[in-house]
Amino acid sequence: MAVAELVVPEQITAAQYLRMSFEHDAEFVEGRIVERAMPTWEHSFMQGFLIRELWRLGQPVGFIVVPEQRVQVSSEHFRVPDVCVVTEAPVGGIVTTPPYLCVEILSPEDSAAATLAKVREYLHFGVAWVWVIDPLTLAGQVHNQTGAANVEDRVFSTDRFSVDVTDMNR
């Protein structure tokens, strides 16, 4: 089943979206609620591993690591990265300043075009680093303001730390 927009009778406002709750949080893009793919076991396992590792690496330098946090990347776009690393807790529960790192863990239903659109939104918003990880192959991409690099060696890095996702299986 492909990720799709939820059926709503008409477009809604960002304020309406923010008052809504979902069993599996949805994103908001230009008046439309966009359903996110249900995570697979591999997706959830990778997410748990990354939260644990990023917390271990980030806590000493003041980073806060959270799963599935709403991030307002523009007035009409709210994204929900699988893992988010910020330098301070958000006021009002929504991240409105650029996170240090956003991680998108791929699900079978995710399209390359939709994932790349999210990456562009994060970078345009000012996110320093964006990781896209395939939990099956343990490969992916690292994006920042100066470009992108494919990751084949299973080591995802920023200017502050690296995570070897091969360790997930230990």
Image (tube, rainbow, N blue to C red):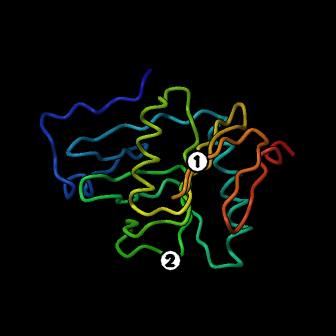
Answer few, some or many: residues within 10 Å of disc 1's Cα (few below 14, many 20 plus, some between 14 and 19). Answer: few
Q: Which mark is residue 148?
A: 1
90 in relation to 68, above or below: below
Is 139 or 2 nearer to us in this picture? 139
Find residue 47 and report its horizontal and vertical position in percent: 63, 48
Q: Which residue is mark 2?
A: 88
Residue under the point 47% across and 38% down: 115
User: Left of 55 or right of it: where is 9?
Assistant: left
Inspect the image, locate mark 1, and give the three-letter code of the amino acid beneath it. Ala
Residue under the point 61% across and 73% down: 63
Q: Which mark is residue 8?
A: none
Q: Secondary structure at mark 2?
A: loop
Is 72 or 123 nearer to us in this picture? 123
Answer few, some or many: residues within 10 Å of disc 2's Cα (few below 14, many 20 plus, some between 14 and 19). Answer: few
Find residue 41 and report its horizontal and vertical position in percent: 65, 34
User: Left of 18 or right of it: where is 170?
Assistant: right
Q: CA distance from mark 2 to mark 1?
A: 26 Å
Find residue 42 and report its horizontal and vertical position in percent: 67, 35
Q: Quadrant of residue 33?
A: top left
Residue under the point 39% across and 57% down: 124
**Which mark is in front, 2 or 1?**
1
N-terminal of the pair, mark 2 or mark 1, is 2
Residue under the point 40% across and 47% down: 25
Is 56 or 132 nearer to us in this picture? 132
Is 114 or 32 nearer to us in this picture? 114
